[in-house]
Amino acid sequence: MQCSFSNRVWALLRGWMNLPFQLPRDFTGSLSEWWATTRKFCRKRYRANFDSAIALACWLLWIWKERNARIFNNVSRSPPPQWFGVYMEEIFVWKAAEFVREPTGIG
């Protein structure tokens, strides 16, 4: 949770979600504890969407994969703003597949 790439991505996501949550780097517990705490910033009807957005960020769109590529292979795939564009495209795919449900907002 201390990776600079990840922290920039989380900051982008926080801005997009327009939620005042603490970034994972500033949280003293595990990522799962952070997730459980952070989702409380969402209205209950948006929590499933929030969970989908965080799951997508954590795994499918490279926070985990990007971090490992940087640490183990010394390779950087994309800067956070470019990553965020790909992330947003994937959100629309998830929405079409109904992994993200109406209402479409997060907070």
Image: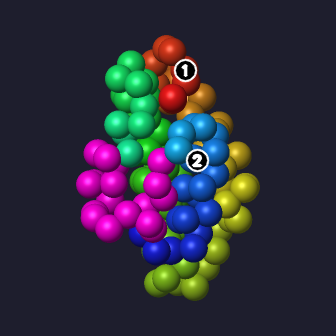
- Magenta-colored stretch includes residue 33: yes
- The residue singled out by tag 2 in the image is 13
Q: Which mark is residue 30?
A: none
Q: Tell me, yes or no, whether the two marked residues, 1 and 2, touch with CB atoms within 8 Å.
A: no
Check the image and report above or below for 83 versus 36. Answer: below
Q: Position of residue 49 (x, y in %)?
A: 44, 29
Specify the color scheme: rainbow
Q: Earlier in the sequence, mark 1 or mark 2?
A: 2
The residue positioned farthest toward the front in the image shown: 20
Which of these two is toward me, 20 or 48? 20
Residue to which mark 1 is pinned: 104
Instruction: Residue 101: give x, y in percent of width and height.
Output: 45, 18
Query: Residue 16: horizontal and vertical position, in percent?
Result: 63, 40
Q: Amino acid type of disc 2?
A: Leu
In the image, farthest residue toward the top: 102
Q: Residues within 10 Å of mark 1 (few under 14, many from 20)?
A: few
Residue at 60% across / 37% down in the picture?
A: 18
Which residue occupies the foreground of this view, 55 or 1?
1
Q: Looking at the image, which residue is at 44% across and 66% down?
A: 26
Q: Residue drawn 49% across and 14% down?
A: 102
Above/below status of 4 relative to 104:
below
> To which quarter of the image does residue 78 belong?
bottom right
Q: Secondary structure at mark 1?
A: loop
Range of magenta residues: 21-37
* Quadrant assignment, res 33: bottom left
Does the magenta portion include 1? no
Query: Would residue 46 appear left or right of 83 to someone viewing this image?
Result: left
Residue 21 as seen in the image, left or right of residue 44: right
Q: Is disc 2 placed on a helix, strand or loop?
A: helix
